[in-house]
Amino acid sequence: MHSRGFTIIELLVSLTILLVLFSVVIPSITKYQGAGRQEALDIEYSTISTSTVAYIVDNGTLPATAEILFERGYLQSQPVLADYTISKDGSVTQVPK
């Protein structure tokens, strides 16, 4: 008689191989995901800093918040990765959400 299907041993070996592969791949993915988020935060911070300087040059005063930069057209979108405060000397501080 020919059996149709897989034995329990074959299924367990296949499952074990898959679990070993996933245990290697998943930490790599999460590592790059964290690095990508940090890169996005750095870019957003740089954009807000540059927009703040442009606002100061155009208006002669500091913007009260980063949202004002968006409302006045200095940013294409509102900051989403962190909250930002602008100090009296014009420096921008990043507060992750």
Image (cartoon, rainbow, N blue to C red):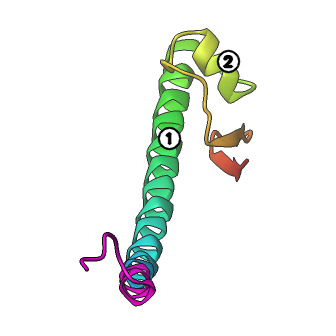
Estimate the x, y position of residue 65 in percent, counting from the top left: 73, 27
Circle 1 sits in a helix, a strand or a loop, which is it?
helix
Residue drawn at the location 50% of the way across and 31% of the way down: 53
In the displayed image of the protein, which residue is found farthest to the front? Answer: 1
Q: Are marks 2 and 1 in contact (CB under 8 Å)?
A: no
Circle 2 sits in a helix, a strand or a loop, which is it?
helix
Q: Which residues are magenta?
A: 1-17
Foreground residue among 35 and 92? 35
Estimate the x, y position of residue 55 in percent, counting from the top left: 54, 21
Residue drawn at the location 41% of the way across and 90% of the way down: 9
Q: Is residue 52 left or right of residue 27?
A: right
Position of residue 64 relative to residue 36, above or below, is above
What residue does disc 2 label? Answer: 68
Foreground residue among 24 and 74? 24
Estimate the x, y position of residue 46 in percent, counting from the top left: 46, 43
Foreground residue among 59 and 97? 97
- On residue 82, which mark appears? none
The picture quadrant where one finds residue 36 is bottom left
Q: Tag 2: residue type?
A: Ile
Estimate the x, y position of residue 18 in percent, counting from the top left: 39, 77
Give the tally of numbered discs: 2
